[in-house]
Amino acid sequence: MMTRLLALAAVVTLAASAAAFDLGNSAPTRPAKPPDNSVYVPPKVPRQGGDTILTAVPIGLYDGAQYTGTTVGYVHNYDEACPYSGSTAPDVVYKATPATTGIWCFDLCYSSYDTKIYIYDQDLNLVACNDDFWFDPPCYTYSSRLYPVTLQAGVEYYIVIDGYGSASGAYVMDIPENCGGGCVIECPDNENVQLEGEPPLVNGYLDAFNGGCNSPEFDNPFQTLLAPVVCGTTGFYLSADQSQYRDTDWFYASIPTGGVLEIAGDAEQMTAMYQLSGDCAGIVSVVQSMTVGPCNEAAMTIAGEPGAQVMFWVGASWDQEVFSNPMEWNWILYTNLEQVIATENNTWSSVKALFK
């Protein structure tokens, strides 16, 4: 049975990344931390991560593997924005070549410092990157995790253990058992389905499709929810200046006969969904919120006069911060809307006209 979520009201602006709800598409800025004033202590364990990709230490990939070491005393060679750039922290490198194509997880939960981890393929293309995943004990606050990462048979990969800012310390890299094949959301193939139809995400993407209030250069385009089932995509990409961005999908819906709009959602990765009020010319308010995925459904009820118009928002959650560039996944909505009409993509000007 779908869980009903209580309304949670908060007023936000699109520019206020520190607000309770961030509706923007550019990565939030994490508050600066004090400099790392730790004193170098020679490692008591053999170096397990190499200094550079050229001296990367080979490891085996198998469920339950664990590799430990330290980055203290090593050199800063690499950095990736996921989404925080500008690291000067020392890093170490492992290398691995899977015997078969599979899905893996790399977990730095039990490390002793603010970590970052990313993977390159043998051509030095970025495969996946994560800065912050864990925020609570028993994991170290701001420790990292990559999941699920698909690695191809016979390809050599380089796993870089790094730190946020100048952070360094002892690390523990677990390759946990039962990482699984990830969550898969399949869209039903029938006449009751509305396809969002947004173009695939690519680096340098310009969201002219349904970017809503995040796309003023395209007249704030909205799409309309019209069907019992709505299938779409969201994810992360890099802007033209290499900043981390996410796709945000803005919708307009009408309260059906009976005065209640029911919306349940799910997604393949952690995804935020909001009922909104306001307009792009002023303040946008979050009326209700829910976080769905991976394969973890939630629902909300929106009450109002039949025919009243509401805004609904779907976007990648910054809380997960699991990045490759670009990275895209499926989401799905289930509604009590009864009639299927051809998908519409509206500008904010046409949406405002509905209020007149």
Image (spheres, rainbow, N blue to C red):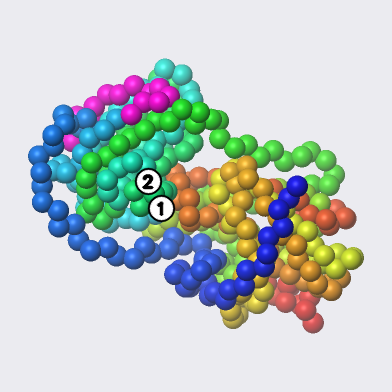
Percent of width and height locating residue 252: 73, 66
Answer with the quarter of the image where residue 92 lies. Answer: top left
Residues marked 1 and 2 touching at CB (< 8 Å): yes
Element under label 2?
A: loop
| Residue depicted at x 46% and y 62% | 26
Q: Residue furthest right?
A: 257
Q: Residue at 49% across / 31% down in the picture?
A: 179
Q: Is residue 166 left or right of residue 139?
A: left
Which stretch did the figure color magenta?
Answer: 51-66
* Residue 230: in magenta span: no
Give amino acid for label 2: Cys
Q: Secondary structure at mark 1?
A: loop
Q: On screen, 321 above or below 279?
A: above
Q: Assess disc 1: are there few (<14), some (14-19) or many (≥20) residues with their C-alpha within 10 Å of its C-alpha.
A: some
The answer to whether 111 is drawn above or below residue 11 in the figure is above
User: Residue at the location (44% across, 44% down)?
Assistant: 324
Q: Is residue 1 visible?
A: yes
Occupied quadrant, residue 282: bottom right
Residue type (three-letter) at the residue carrying disc 1: Phe
| Closer to us: 35 or 204 | 35
Horizontal side of 348 relative to 201 (left or right) equals right
| Residue highlighted by disc 1 | 135
Residue 58 highlighted magenta (yes or no): yes
* Residue drawn at x 31%, y 32% as measured from the top left: 158
As drawn, the label of residue 139 is 2
